[in-house]
Image (tube, rainbow, N blue to C red):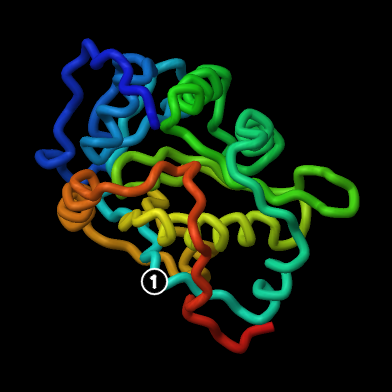
């Protein structure tokens, strides 16, 4: 079971009273208690571009992936049979791959790496990993934070075609199996939209978040029977 850290010493801003700007606060720290308080309040941390200051973000238009709305085309379904999927066996390796500075929009710095590794050690942050069964190499994955019925996805990467998508398919199956109800993807992108993600208002997200935080799930590392009744299409 996750270990509850010491409470934050900071008074974080309220996402409920935020305006149209996605950035709702600046400052504080990345202690486990602070980061968890932010997620419970509908926010997540990301440093301001080119600065050491931590920004607290709550998008006015929030991206979520409905757990009953994942779209798996024929090509992706075939890819799901190509990799071995594991949970929490290489958390830092996944985080480091996501932090690769050569990637467009890279934002994960050393402070973020330390903060999320601490959350992982306490049982709050988790990884889903795709491994090549022939080479034994880590070829894709994602990580995020599990609080109540919420999984807040942070980042994903791939070194083999479809590997990050396969990790997402596995995550959705796992979340449904343990009883989670909300998968946050922060901002909607065309890539995520193609997989079934949608955009909702901040107010609607906070309403769903409140329900998720009052949802009891099995622990993330509990065995969960995968489901296989996602929406599918005929795209190759």
> Circle 1 is placed at which residue position?
68
- The residue positioned 39% from the left and 18% from the top of the image is 30
Q: Quadrant of residue 104?
A: top right
- The count of marks equals 1
How far from the left and from the top, in percent, is residue 96?
66, 31
Q: Quadrant of the C terminus?
A: bottom right
Q: Is residue 93 above or below residue 233?
A: above
Name the one closer to the observer, 34 or 136: 136
Q: Quadrant of residue 9?
A: top left
Q: Is residue 130 visible?
A: yes
Residue neighbourhood size for the residue with mark 1, other residues' Cα within 10 Å, grouped as few (<14), some (14–19), many (≥20)? some
How far from the left and from the top, in percent, is residue 36?
31, 28
Residue at the extreme left of the image, as rendered: 17
How far from the left and from the top, in percent, is residue 218?
37, 47
Helix, strand or loop for disc 1: loop
- The residue positioned 55% from the left and 23% from the top of the image is 113
């Amino acid at each position: 079971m996750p270990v509850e850290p010491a409470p934050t010493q900071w008074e974080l801003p309220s996402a409920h009273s935020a305006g149209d700007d996605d950035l709702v606060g600046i400052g504080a720290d990345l202690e486990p208690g602070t980061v968890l308080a932010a997620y419970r309040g509908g926010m997540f941390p990301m440093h301001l571009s080119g600065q050491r200051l931590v920004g607290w973000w709550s998008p006015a238009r929030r991206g979520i992936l409905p757990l009953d709305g994942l779209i798996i085309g024929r090509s992706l379904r075939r890819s799901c049979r190509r990799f071995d999927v594991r949970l929490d066996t290489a958390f830092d390796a996944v985080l480091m791959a996501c932090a690769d500075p050569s990637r467009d929009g890279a934002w994960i710095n050393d402070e973020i790496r330390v903060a999320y590794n601490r959350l992982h050690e306490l049982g709050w942050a988790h990884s889903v990993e795709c491994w090549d069964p022939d080479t034994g190499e880590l070829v894709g994955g994602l990580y995020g934070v599990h609080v109540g019925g919420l999984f807040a996805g942070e980042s994903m990467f791939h070194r083999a075609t479809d590997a990050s998508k396969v990790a997402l398919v596995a995550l959705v199956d796992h979340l449904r199996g343990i009883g989670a109800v909300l998968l946050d993807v922060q901002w909607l992108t065309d890539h995520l939209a193609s997989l079934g993600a949608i955009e909702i208002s901040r107010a609607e997200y906070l309403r769903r978040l409140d329900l998720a935080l009052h949802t009891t799930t099995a622990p993330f590392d509990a065995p969960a029977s995968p489901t296989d009744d996602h929406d599918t299409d005929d795209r190759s």
